Amino acid sequence: MVDHAKLKECWLAVQNDGDRKSFDRIYLATWRTLYSYAWSRTHDEDVSKDMVQDVFVKLWNKRSTINIRDYVIAYLMTSLKNQLIDYFYKEDRNNTVVQRAYYLMEMVVKQDELGLSYERAEEILQEEMEKMPGNMRQSLQLRLENYDVKEIAQTLNLADQTVSNLLSEAKKRLRKDLPKRFENYNNIHSFTFIYFVYQLLINS
């Protein structure tokens, strides 16, 4: 069991004095918890180890500027979740944008507080897409399946710029209309889902 008071004491020694032994104590007390969480999300031992290592490297390198007000383990877990979000933005291309967005939301929202199933989230998005003109809907559908602009253009026999314009307008419509469709669900969590969908569409 993590001794939060002891960890905070160790952290103060690290931050104020650069105490390496205290840093090692923090590592030994928390690395297994962090690794287990990373592995439960990635199911990749090497990736999980690298993420945990990066968390501690950043903690040490930025020790003089980091402000940990509450629990040290909470700070470390937040840092790890940020690593996971970056990982899934960049690496998880086998799942659709909607699947990835929902998975990312699960990482930042407690499971028993989601209040929104993946199936319902996907259903709402598909209903909004049905309101779009044919080429716009088809372009967005392919984008959600991780096709890039050039691949969409080739598939639909459209110019690259036409596809870019269609996707830009589709994103504007989703940004405007999706929040209204999630009004009956937890606002914070629904906003989180919408945010991840939008960011994945932009950055994928």
Image: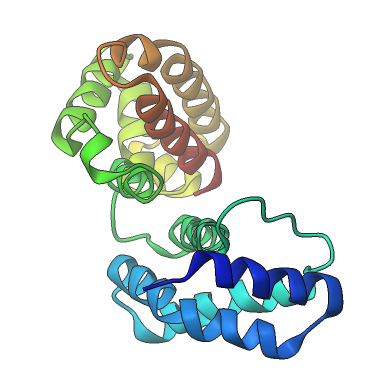
The residue sitting at the left extreme is 119
Horizontal side of 148 relative to 190 (left or right) equals right
In the rendered image, the vertical position of residue 181 relative to residue 167, given as above or below: above
Q: How far across and down, in percent of the image, does residue 147 sit?
A: 39, 49
Q: Quadrant of residue 59?
A: bottom right
Q: List x then y, in percent, for residue 184.
A: 25, 12
- Classify residue 180 by image quadrant: top left
Q: Nearer the viewer, residue 200 or 194?
A: 194
x 41%, y 29%: residue: 194
**Residue 173 relative to residue 18: left or right:** left
Residue 67, percent from left and from top: 74, 54
Q: Is residue 158 visible?
A: no
Q: Which residue sits at x=66%, y=50%?
A: 69
Q: How is the image coloured?
A: rainbow
* Marker count (numbered): 0
Q: Is 61 positioned to the left or the right of 189 in the image?
A: right
In the image, residue 62 above or below residue 112: below
Q: Residue 152 at what x, y percent from top left?
A: 40, 42
| In this view, 196 is above or below 83 | above
Above or below 136: residue 105: below
The residue nearer to you, when weighing 39 against 195, is: 39
Screen quadrant of the N terminus: bottom left
- What residue lies at 17% left-to-right and 26% top-to-bottom? 123
Residue at 73% x, 76% y: name it.
60
Camera-side residue: 25 or 118? Answer: 25
> Can residue 79 be seen from the camera position used here?
yes
